[in-house]
Image (tube, rainbow, N blue to C red):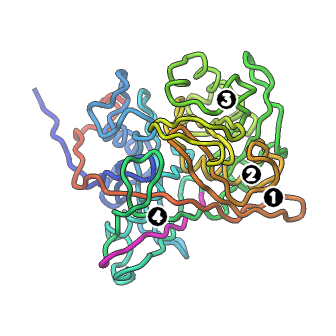
Amino acid sequence: MTHVPQIKVPAVYMRGGTSKGVFFRLQDLPEAAQAPGAARDNFLLRVIGSPDPYGKQIDGMGGATSSTSKAVIVARSSRPGHDVDYLFGQVSIDKPFVDWSGNCGNLSAAVGAFAISSGLVHHERIPRDGTFTVRIWQANINKTIVAHVPITHGQVQETGDFELDGVTFPAAEVRLEFMDPAAEEGDGGGAMFPTGSLVDDLEVPGVGTLKATLINAGIPTVFVNARDIGFTGTELQDDVNGDPKALAMFEAIRAHGAVRMGLISHVDEAARRQHTPKVAFVAPAAPYTASSGRRIEVQDVDLLVRALSMGKLHHAMMGTAAVAIGTAAAIPGTLVSLAAGGGGQEAVRFGHPSGTLRVGAVARRIKGDWVVTKAVMSRSSRVLMEGWVRVPADAFSSRSGV
């Protein structure tokens, strides 16, 4: 019997915000995986441990949740004014599929640190102490992210006292600026408001006609009112993820929202585009107990938001969805702005299942159209393990099970 050897590939396992993923330098990938295509997808699926019919990803680096089934590829950028190019892959847990349709805002917080520590930024540019600005080209959505990475003694500072709800331990703060986060005409998803309206009537068979804000900023997102779908906005993960009917409803909303936004032409295509759009429900500020046991009082937040990722309620908030929240809150008349009390809010603190998060956005109206120049929030990141990942040498072929 012929045994296939394993190959080892340099990699770093990192936490960024409330997500974890396997980070690679493009140059370190096996040659067949250095270009987009089936070989790259098959390689990443094997690294993460997908597809797994058991839903556990035991034979890979994934953690069996949307927040932990992720891969990142970073390369030195040839684009003027940028240090690195960053490509994000959301790896399906139970299907042989890697979704490249959007960014991960949480892992964006780790890209700058990875670039510095991996030698993708020239060492002579790094200060001995202070903050180093890494300009990142987000290749999935063709946008710029500016990461302000703390430096101590010439090295990336990872420890600190910055606390992020959804992350157990404090760490060093990384401030992120998502430049021009809204989609423009000619982008894959159309304009910031693809329908041309701040609020639409979204018809969802079996659910009804819902008021919805369909926005493409940070990541395409469908916002609906919690009360319109029988929720309060104070729900925790088990309240939704343990209810198959509720999950089916949210997937129907997501699929019909994707069609309305022009992301797909038929609802059946939504299954092949799991990462985008996101669906979220909003409600006015109200008290609740977060998953950590911490009590959130009504005065602690401006509104409540719950969002689903890869078919399940997220334990905290996706970073890109936070950008969508901040952008929508800055524009009067959206469901997000109305839930926050109306008017345009340059910054909001919203409640999510794990606690609260503050996000800001700068919006202005130009010739009747809303323009958002940037969205800003703080996250943290940390290297969890570094070295090599190992995969069977046939991981690039179709016979490897993908």
Taking 130 as reference, is 304 left or right?
right
Mark 3 or mark 4: which comes first in sequence?
4
Tag 3 residue: 232
Secondary structure type for disc 1: strand
Q: Position of residue 88 (x, y in %)?
A: 47, 50
| Marks 2 & 1, CB-CB < 8 Å contact | yes
Mark 1 or mark 4: which comes first in sequence?
4
The span shown in magenta is: 142-154
- Crowding around mark 4 (Cα neighbors within 10 Å: few <14, some 14 to 19, many 20+) is many
Q: Position of residue 325 (x, y in %)?
A: 66, 48
Judging depth in this view, the residue of 134 and 47 nearest the camera is 134
Secondary structure type for disc 4: strand
Of the numbered discs in the image, which one, if any, rests on residue 192?
2
Residues at marks 3 and 4, CA–CA distance in whole angstroms:
32 Å
Tag 1 residue: 370
Tag 4 residue: 174
Residues at marks 4 and 2, CA–CA distance in whole angstroms:
26 Å
Q: Which secondary structure class fits the magenta region best?
A: strand
The amino acid at mark 2 is Met
- Crowding around mark 2 (Cα neighbors within 10 Å: few <14, some 14 to 19, many 20+) is many
Q: Nearer the viewer, mark 2 or mark 1?
A: 1
Figure quadrant of residue 251 = top right
